[in-house]
Amino acid sequence: METEGQPPQPMLPRGFAGRIFGFLMERLAESNYAWVVDQLRTIESRTYLEIGFGTGKLAELVARELKPTCICGVDPSLLMFERAARRLRRYHRTIEVDLRVGNDSHLPWAERSFDAIVASHSFQFWSDPHRTLRRIHRLLRPSGRFIVVLRSHRKISRKVRAWLPNPITKSGRELEALRSVLAETGFRIVCDQRLESGSQGLIVECV
């Protein structure tokens, strides 16, 4: 049950219900996470940033499979931050881990810091996608890649539309509009793929 005045659980998991939501989210996204890791294998992913890291499962896979030098991330949920921090604790001796509580507007790292930036099922929660994409463009190194995974939002109920912050998602044409905005903010799509889960995976590079 939601507390009046607080964001819905998908946007800000918390409490017992948030732990259940996190578990389900992780299970449903397993194949998406595997796809992202496979794409990261093809580039020199030494420095990694995840926007909306959730339970930290994807970051853990990146740490275990790719062994980067640095894993950074932001997530607005304190519950998810604590879960992900515990999950990545074992890698602290070999990987610099910098997780923070924050949203897509909180990306304080230096420009040209990352080989790979990933947003898996968090795009709909961005309040200012144009601004965030421009910031991502500055954070990526010249040969870096931005990977975004979207759910299919062909129909959004009025109730959900009322609280979703991302105007692109609210439009009902999320994927088509995102493709256009990526071009506007200096990106080129190099892969645009329907995933096994039904989500859409996009890999983009800086123009």
Image (cartoon, rainbow, N blue to C red):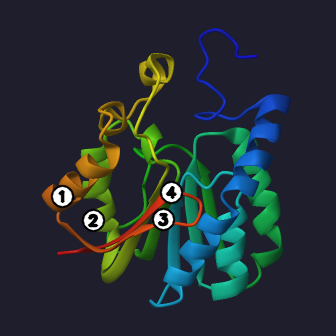
Secondary element type, mark 3: strand
Residue at the image position 27 percent from the left and 65 percent from the top: 137
Q: Residue furthest top?
A: 4
Would you identify the image quadrant in which residue 193 lies? bottom left
**Of callouts 4 and 3, the N-terminal one:** 3
Q: Which circle, 1 or 4, is nearer the viewer?
A: 4
32 relative to 108 in the view: left or right: right
Residue 27 lies, with reference to residue 5, above or below; the image says below
Label 1 – label 3 distance at C-alpha: 17 Å
Identify the image quadrant of the C terminus: bottom left
Q: Amino acid at mark 4?
A: Ser
Relative to the observer, which residue lies in front, 204 or 51?
Answer: 204
Secondary element type, mark 2: helix
**Of callouts 1 and 2, the N-terminal one:** 2
Q: Amino acid at mark 2?
A: His
Residue at the image position 50 percent from the left and 81 percent from the top: 39
Q: Which circle, 1 or 2, is nearer the viewer?
A: 1
Q: Position of residue 123 (x, y in %)?
A: 43, 47
Q: Amino acid at mark 3?
A: Val
Would you identify the image quadrant in which residue 37 lies? bottom right
Residue 67 appears in the figure = no
> Are circles 1 and 3 on residues that touch, CB within 8 Å?
no
Q: Which residue is mark 4?
A: 199
Secondary element type, mark 4: loop
Q: Which circle, 4 or 3, is nearer the viewer?
A: 4
Label 3 – label 2 distance at C-alpha: 12 Å
**Of callouts 4 and 2, the N-terminal one:** 2
Q: Position of residue 175 (x, y in %)?
A: 33, 50
> Are circles 4 and 3 on residues that touch, CB within 8 Å?
no
Identify the image quadrant of the N terminus: top right
Q: Which residue is mark 2?
A: 137
Residue 49 appears in the figure = yes
